[in-house]
Amino acid sequence: MIGTTAASDARALSAILVAILSLVVLGIPIALSVDRKSRGALLTGTAFLYGSGAIFLELLALSVLNVRWTLVSVTIAALLVSSASAAVARLRVPVQPTRPPVIVRPHLFDAATLLTIAGYAVYATLAPLWEWDFWAIWGLKARVFLDAGGIDWRFLGSPLNTFAHVDYPQLVSFNFDLVALIGGEWSDRWLGLLFVAWSLAIVLIVRALAARETTPFLGALITFGLSGLAVSRYVGLAEGALIAFGSAGVLFVRSALDDDDPASWRHGALMLGFAANCKNEGLALLAAVTMALVAESWWRGLVRARSEGDSGKPIRRVFTTLLRLAPAYILAIPWLLLRATHALPTDIAGGSAASRLMARLPYAHQILGFLMAKLYQPWLWVAVLVGILLAPSVARRRERFVFFVTGIQFFFYVGAYLSTPHNLRWHVLSSWPRLTGQIALPIAFVVLVMLANSLQASQDAPHAEARPDE
Amino acid sequence: MTVRRALTALCFTAILAFAVEPRLLQMPFTDRGPLVRMYDGYYDRQWPTYRAFLAGVRAHTKPGDTVTVIVPAMGWDDGYSYAYYRASYYLTGRVVLPVVGPENVRYLQNFRAARYVAEFGVRLPVPADVIWQGDGGTLLRLRR
């Protein structure tokens, strides 16, 4: 460790703990303004994610308004957001939920989940963040912005710094900056705890969503299994936050498609909007969700139209569904506009992406074979595919949306590889495990729920959370 | 129990087994010492004092200063990319000018443009004042 003392280490640890707590406190009124009936695990998980997303928007707004980032300016902005959210939460009339609210009852397996998270906390804080991409991309930009007191457009616009992926959205870097503002100086010693918090947040959300659909035992067991997919071993990169926001977004939209609960729609759209501000893959995920939603709502509208004899139904349904996703785009647009205004280059799109794509298309089968050979956790994916085949067809139809999203996102990844300006082999080897890790959780969740409910078929599995099974 | 039901149970168990991270479950009970030594400076093993040297360079330069780095490995993939990116991280606020780029393109104009040269593990025969020395390197201010 360079230039650190026990005292500065302790100060840095206090700063990150205060930052995480502050994000939860900031996020609670936002989470309640989204879903007044949210409680327990769901409230805690969503509160941290909303706090983390809100701080990104605040720092972005301060930067655009040319207000220097200080602890005072950020605190004032946070108080304004918090008060506004609390007012919205109070004004929001609680609607009759489309399904009864679920209280997550603790189970023995929850201890195993907590042990996984504790193990991740040990791993993530072994040393100052060590990943190459942390100090060449995410941490570098955070440190540059901290020195500048806001976004340093000169740094981002310099051709010397294109290696830092200057076009990438800034949610993760800004969260690092919040910790530094609280601590009064830059320190990467304990920043890994932010990644633990993102993982714990998605684990809590998964636990709450699983409790809605299966028994406490199976809900706890599924969450324990998925806790391994909720943590990113790339500590310091945007993957951890992207897994949390992206998975939450996909799972909330899936839930909304099922019960049309307005709160689930709002959660889904906002989480996807924040996912789009984590990384370019988050933007791709938003596009994938949009395409999957169009297909799914068209299909559902068509089925309804046939039974009701209303030919305009599918189009109206698609339109209504897309409107519900509007908050995601509203959140994604500011950074897209800023990066377009400042002409920040995207490496994949650099040069002639189309000609690279066309040149590699004849070798697509070889490239796909290479991707299969280098797949991270291949047996998990095999088991997931077998699970899809084994599940009852009714359950498969219900989960079509998540299958579409995963498939489209895979397609986007392959498209990016086909058009990459980098050495293809190097690009695949250095990113493929991370990319597959980004999208594993939602599909594993739905397959596990399908299989669990199939095993419990004789006992009316959906909404079975009240059933004593232990 | 039908065959399908047995396969479903097997598949459910398999997904859980493949998804769970056993290493994380063991982590709270393992000796952290060897892991800490492995991860602390994971990419710095070739030049263990380079980070400390850069921290010294930061302490002896001001925001806005231009600095270039010279290291024993002057090939982009042989170590210069590491040296340059690492310097960019430790010297934020300063402008770090690379003298080598991808494909080993040389940018001698950056050497001439820099106010300071941070030489690590090498000595350059150039007219310059020594600003600071330590941790295996020297910070030079070029004489104009």
Image (spheres, grey):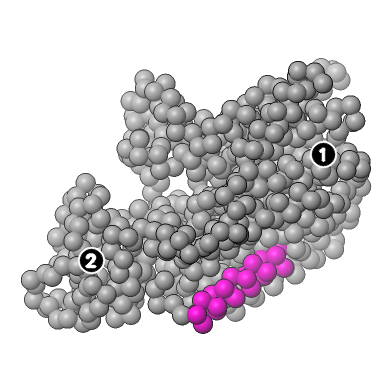
Residue A159 shown in magenta: no
* In front of the other: A244 or A253: A244
Tell whether A351 sits left or right of A247. Answer: left
Q: Which chain carries label 2?
A: B
* In front of the other: A141 or A378: A378
Tell whether B136 sits left or right of A179. Answer: left
Q: Which residue is drawn at 47% across and 73% down?
A: A186
Which image quadrant is residue B135 in? bottom left
Residue A246 drawn at (x, y percent): 62, 46
* In front of the other: B38 or A222: B38
| Residue bearing the label numbered 1 | A213
Tell whether A184 sits left or right of A386. Answer: left
Task: State how far apart marks 2 and 1 are (Cα).
Answer: 58 Å
What's drawn in magenta, residue-wise?
Answer: A6-27
Residue A331 drawn at (x, y percent): 61, 52
Tell whether A38 sits left or right of A227. Answer: right
Residue A392 drawn at (x, y percent): 77, 22
Q: Main secondary structure of the magenta part?
A: helix
